[in-house]
Amino acid sequence: MSNSYVPATQKTMYFIGVTTTKSSIMGVFPAWSDFLGLDAIIRGIDFKPHDEPTKYRECVSFIKNDPLSLGALVTTHKVDLLKATRDLFNGLDPCARWLNEVSSLSKQGTELWGHAKDPISSGLALEAFVREGYWKESGGEVLILGAGGSSLALTIYLINKAKEGKDIPRRIVVTNRSSGRLMEMQKIHETVDSPIFLDYHLCRNSTDNDRVLTGMKPGSLIINATGLGKDAPGSPLTDKAAFPEKGLVWEFNYRGDLVFLDQARAQQKSRGLAIEDGWTYFIHGWTQVIAEVFHIHIPTRGPKFNRLSKIAASARS
């Protein structure tokens, strides 16, 4: 949709992204709304990555001041949106303040609040993919390609799990094509006493990422958190990249050309890879935000969550 804001005539949740009309949520949300009794609709708002601050401010101001606009889920723009609109929020949850990003906008009466839900949703998705005890058994590490908000959130989840004495990887490597995000991530990590060794690499192109990949141990988890394959074409790796033996591969996206996923699947048998796309992450990410926006409880497992997952799969197909 074009970014022209018309007052909502019924309860409305927004999806702030890049190519929102292509997302499965446009078909899934109406079915979820019926099941959950929300009596609400969803609207997409598209911006270019790292768009002009004035555009983010116009959007957030509209949602804040329109009575039937109840909130939003934010992808891609989580850091940039908050940077441009921080003064418009009446409050931020602890993770949003700490990570300097918002993945969810909700209202408490007339107040607008921002939330960072990714440390929860990414952790839930990881737990569904990687069994307890895996890291100790395999000795694997984690390589995250891309240093955006989702990447930072996952590192925070793992650091918190480490502090609880849970099974975690001993080393996390993060790459990014620009130094700014790496530096921001490192500054946040320096505020916590991390039991995990954190390693940062400036990789300006896919060949640089290939080189870092070769240093990962067998059994390591390799993640595409760049947005390449969804928000922009391509992959952070070249076709010559070799995934670690018996490794785990996680594509944060579930839609798009997903070249990274194709690269992994081409090596799945020869290198014994376990591969996951972003669908489970999608389910947890959206249900966490919907619960916040509509002030309802949505369980993260069990019959009701399984029903929501089945509804989403049916609507997606």
Image (tube, grey):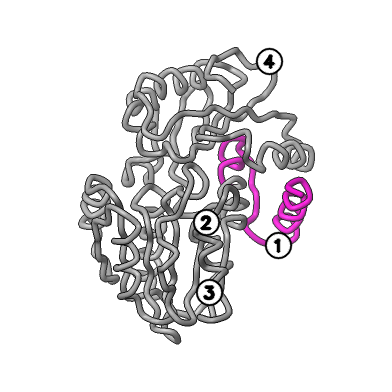
Please state which of the two labelled residues, at mark 4 or mark 3, is closer to the viewer.
Answer: 3
Task: Please check the rendered image and state whether residue 309 is part of the magenta-colored stretch, yes or no.
Answer: yes
* Secondary element type, mark 2: helix
In the displayed orientation, state which residue is furthest to the bottom.
137
Q: Residue at x 47, y 51 (%)?
A: 234
Residue 165 location (% of width, % of height): 38, 75
- Mark 1 or mark 3, which is nearer to you? 3
Query: Is the C-beta separation of discs 4 and 1 under 8 Å?
Result: no
- Labels 2 and 1: the sequence-earlier one: 2
Query: Start and end of the magenta stretch?
Result: 288-317
Q: Quadrant of residue 137?
A: bottom left
4 vs 1, front mark: 4
Rounded to the nearest angstrom, the CA distance separating label 1 from label 3 is 34 Å
User: How many numbered callouts?
Assistant: 4
How far apart are the two marked residues, 2 and 1, measured between alpha carbons?
33 Å
The residue at which mark 4 appears reads as 9
Around disc 1, counting alpha carbons within 10 Å, would you say few (fewer than 14), some (14 to 19), or many (20 or more)?
few
Image point (73%, 47%), residue name? 316
Check disc 2 and report the residue beneath it: 259
Q: Nearer the viewer, residue 266 or 141?
A: 266
Dot 1: element? loop
Q: Which residue type carries mark 2?
A: Val
Q: Main secondary structure of the magenta part?
A: helix
Inter-mark Cα distance, 4 to 1: 35 Å
Name which residue type carries label 3: Gln
The amino acid type found where label 4 is placed reads Thr
Few, some or many residues within 10 Å of mark 3 (<14, 14–19, 20+): some
Q: Which residue is mark 1?
A: 302
Mark 2 or mark 3, which is nearer the start of the sequence? 2
Is tag 1's residue or tag 3's residue first in the polypeptide sequence?
3
